[in-house]
Image (cartoon, rainbow, N blue to C red):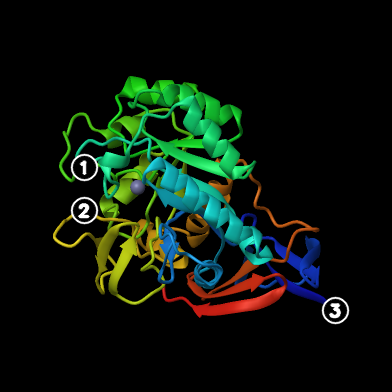
Amino acid sequence: MSLQSIVSRHLESGESLRIEWTGEIITQIQPAPESHASKWLAPCLFDVQVNGYNGVDFQGDDVGLEDLLRAVHGLRQAGCTTFLLTLITDEWPRLLRRLNHLRDLRQQSPELIQAIRGWHLEGPFLSPEPGYHGAHNPAWMLDPSPRHLRELAATVEGDAVLLTMAPERQGVMAAVEAATAMGWKVSLGHSNASAAELAEAILRGARGFTHLANACPRELDRHDNIVWRVMDGGFNFFSLIPDGMHVSPPLFRLIHRAAGKPRIIYTSDAMAAAGAPPGRYRLGTMELEVGGDQIVRQPGKTNFAGSALRPIEGVLRATKMLGGDWREAWRRYSVNPAALMGWDPALKPGMPADFCLLTTNSNGNLEEMQVWHRGRLFAVTELLN
Ligand SMILES: [Zn+2]
């Protein structure tokens, strides 16, 4: 196995570095005397909420190994090598069966084990209130009990779990505490909780809020609504869908300016249409329409149902909306989501040689992305920011 190396700049410090690897594993990262002003080394994107991709709906009951690999390859092409496979509200036994099936498939492929870092259960412990339930079916929603958590723990067998729950539901406060004690991470969402309920859930261990400014009615009380309450609350993290549609550009900018301490996480909340052409796609039992504008809708309804956003496109759109530094956007789609899960994504010797190499033009804008996977160049994408 031959030694390979690349000189580029560190995403955070801007310092010149040489990364070396042999076969699939990084052997050394050290300062380099030569400089490469326009090349940047970054950890690949990590998405905490992916419901499907590349034509594959993870909510389907007939998902096969090839389907999961197709989704993983599509995400990797878009700069995202790891993600939390997300299952949305369904009848509880069916949800567990689906999770079990997906875990079995993952077990059959080292590539899937590496890519699917864990599971995000968005539901069924959510608010059934109109507007807040979004595309989730309120009929399948539940109050969490210790039995549900035991059954889930027996199914995931120690895998990483992110749970999105609405704290105003009966039993959620105890579930937040129990989930946190098991090492799972809790994000609140699809919720119209009061400020006091949000604060109590945070005290009991909730860390984040899921896709802020979505999963709420289009029209809200201007003085008191869930978006203001969350922004005014003590969250460590909240996620945003940076496609320019789920959160309007002015609100997107305002949230970034007002965020202060909480770390903002970008997520695609992608469904099957992401990385695939416009058309009709499924998300569980729903048939959804995706137009050329990439907006995902239930036919005849105005609310969004997931997105068709490709992760790298999210970095570009966020950078454009903020008129800021692409490196900040990259952090919010790699370092920050890893921090929500308690992980350190920094590239180090001994780790697999999975990284992105970004090239910038003379204005400092992104021009090209190379995705390196297991020491090999997997994809080169031209970026027009
Ligand atoms: Zn949602």
Q: Residue at x 43, y 59 (%)?
A: 61
Q: Amino acid at mark 2?
A: Asn
CB atoms of marks 2 and 1 within 8 Å: yes
Which residue is tagged 1? 131
Asked if 244 appears above or below 273 in the picture, the reply is: above
Marker disc for residue 278? none
| Residue receiving disc 3 | 2
Residue 113 appearing in the image: yes
The amino acid at mark 1 is Gly
Residue 118 in the image, given as x and y percentages of width and height: 57, 49
Mark toward the viewer: 3 or 2: 2
Within-10-Å neighbours for mark 1: few <14, some 14–19, many 20+: some
Q: Residues within 10 Å of mark 3 (few under 14, many from 20)?
A: few
Q: Nearer the viewer, mark 1 or mark 3?
A: 1
Q: Residue at x 31, y 41 (%)?
A: 140
Question: What residue is rendered at 31% in x and 35% in y?
Answer: 191
**Whole-percent x and y of residue 153?**
57, 37
Q: Position of residue 105 (x, y in %)?
A: 58, 61
Tag shown at residue 303: 2
Q: Earlier in the sequence, mark 1 or mark 3?
A: 3
Left/right placement of residue 318 relative to residue 207 reads: left
Q: Quadrant of the C terminus?
A: bottom left
